[in-house]
Image (tube, grey):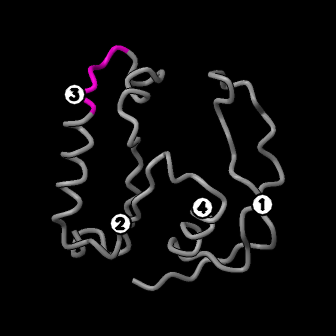
Amino acid sequence: WKKLFPCARVILNYRNDLAGQVKSGFYSGSKVEDARKRTENMKRVFGNSEMQDRIFDLPLESFSLAKFNELLKWLGFSGCSYRRVAHANNNGTYKDGNNSNLVNGTCTYGLST
């Protein structure tokens, strides 16, 4: 991985609540056991990778202002922080468009490989 993609960063995003995941729009109709297998396989593949220092674990249940600001720094941005976490599907709909003015400061990028 590191030879082919020296600057790659991987964000592992999944749900710990597998029953909730199979009820969500994208996985609607899936079985809990299938969701468990997919999640375990993803964690196994990336967990055994030589890129451990390039993987950010972000389950849905960890979404918080602190976690997203940690992600921002991990990605190599400085000089800015999030004000709040954007929410794209409030109440099961994608019509909540109040996702403006989310960042404090001016982001600059400076990640070394």
Going from N to C along the chain, the mark reached first, 1 or 2, is 2
Upstream in the sequence, badge 1 or badge 4? Answer: 4
Task: Find residue 2 and report its image quarter.
Answer: bottom left
Residue identifier under label 4: 68
**Kind of residue at badge 3:** Asp
Magenta segment includes 19:
no
Residue that numbered label 3 is attached to: 34
Which badge, 3 or 1, is on the more N-terminal residue?
3
Label 2 sits on residue: 55
Circle nearer the N terminus (3, 4): 3
Q: Label 2: few (<14), some or many (≥20) within 10 Å?
A: some
Q: Is residue 30 magenta?
A: yes
Q: Quadrant of residue 32?
A: top left
Left or right, 37 with respect to 13, comes to left
Q: Amino acid at mark 4?
A: Phe
27 on left or right of 1: right
Circle 2 sits in a helix, a strand or a loop, which is it? strand
Per the rendered image, the range of residues in magenta is 29-35
Residues under labels 3 and 4: Cα distance? 28 Å
